[in-house]
Image: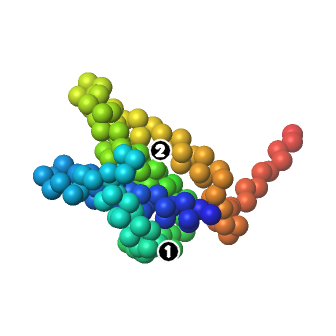
Amino acid sequence: MSKVIQNSLIAFIMATSVTALFYQSNINFVKVEIFHIPILFIAILVLSLFIAEDVRDSFKKVLWFEKREDKRPIWQVGIGMIFYFTQIGFVEVFARGLMQYDLGGMPMYVIIPFLNAFLLTVIFEEIFYKEEKNNVHAVKFKNKIK
């Protein structure tokens, strides 16, 4: 289930990135929408669903995920990144009106997703992360009675 969620979110990120990039152009057919959802987004999302698993595996190879002794930190960073860019992509495509607000010069649509991604990563980790038994180190306490 975790892989399905991750792959879906990665496909969403790819689709929103391409849609946001082309939506600001002067090409009119890119701006065609159905129920306020750009047709370009739907097409790219369908195509992205097929390659999302390969993209995720490529990142794991580049970051040497399988060779790491402790996989948890890089797993957390990867999941956090997926949640962060999903929220940024959502704002850029579906809620462009929220892009105008800022906090001392820093756009709010960049700050709020960072905080949300942290919380979502913790929740996602509690639900899906399985710690391997060979990475858990037993701690022995000595009984010091005088």
Against 139, residue 52 (above or below) is below
Counting from the top left corner in percent of width and height, residue 77 is at 46, 54
Q: List x then y, in percent, for residue 106.
A: 27, 32
Q: Is residue 13 visible?
A: yes
Q: Residue furthest left?
A: 26
Q: Earlier in the sequence, mark 2 or mark 1?
A: 1
Q: Is residue 146 left or right of residue 62?
A: right
* Of the pair 26 and 63, the residue shown nearer to us: 26
Q: Which mark is residue 67?
A: 1
Type of amino acid under label 1: Lys
Task: Work out which quarter of the rendered image holds the N terminus and state it.
Answer: bottom right
- Quote the CA–CA distance across marks 2 and 1: 26 Å
- In the image, 146: left or right of 126? right
In percent of the image, x 49 and y 43: which residue is there? 118
Residue type (three-letter) at the residue carrying disc 2: Ala
Q: Position of residue 117 (x, y in %)?
A: 47, 44
Q: Position of residue 21 (x, y in %)?
A: 22, 54
Residue under label 2, please give it. 117
| Residue 52 seen in the figure | no
